[in-house]
Image (cartoon, helix red, strand yellow):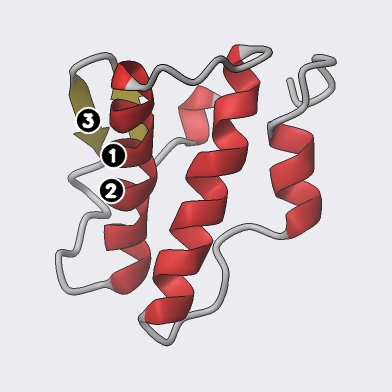
Amino acid sequence: HYADARAMYIPGMVILNNQSWEEQDPVQLSLLVHELVHHAQLFSKRAYPCAAAKEYEAYTIQNKWLEEHGQHAFASQYWIDKMSSCDGSSY
């Protein structure tokens, strides 16, 4: 649901919602981490079974970054599994 997005990656560009962006907020910074994972995926030789599968890596790394900064996970494992499913059930 892109209308709810606070951050988005379009190849070569990260878009952040400047109305909610707070550079000192670890959760906001984690959104940037998530989108930068997608940027790195653009250059990866790794094959993904579908576009949604890239979300698994992005959310997992985002959650790990938050954990390392003393914060709670952004997304549950259930959410990650749903959003990274190639069966179309995440849409």
Front label number (1 vs 3): 1
Label 3 Cα neighbours within 10 Å, binned few <14 / some 14-19 / many ≥20: some
Residue type, numbered disc 1: Leu
| Residue at the extreme bottom of the image, as rendered | 70
Q: Which mark is residue 36?
A: 1
Q: CA distance from mark 1 to mark 3?
A: 7 Å
Would you place residue 66 above or below residue 9 in this image?
below
Label for residue 72?
A: none
| Residue at 18% over, 45% down | 18
User: For the residues carrying marks 2 and 1, which lies nearer the camera in this image?
Assistant: 1
- Is 29 above or below relative to 5? below
Q: Position of residue 84 (x, y in %)?
A: 69, 31
Q: SS class of the residue under badge 3?
A: strand
Q: Tag 2, which secondary structure?
A: helix
**Residue pictured at 36% horizontal, 81% vertical:** 69
What secondary structure is found at the residue carrying circle 1?
helix
* Residue of label 3: 14
Figure label count: 3
Asked whether disc 2 touches disc 1, contact meaning CB atoms under 8 Å apart, the reply is yes
Give the quadrant of residue 24.
bottom left
Amino acid type of the residue tagged 3 in the rendering: Val
Q: Are marks 2 and 3 in contact (CB under 8 Å)?
A: yes
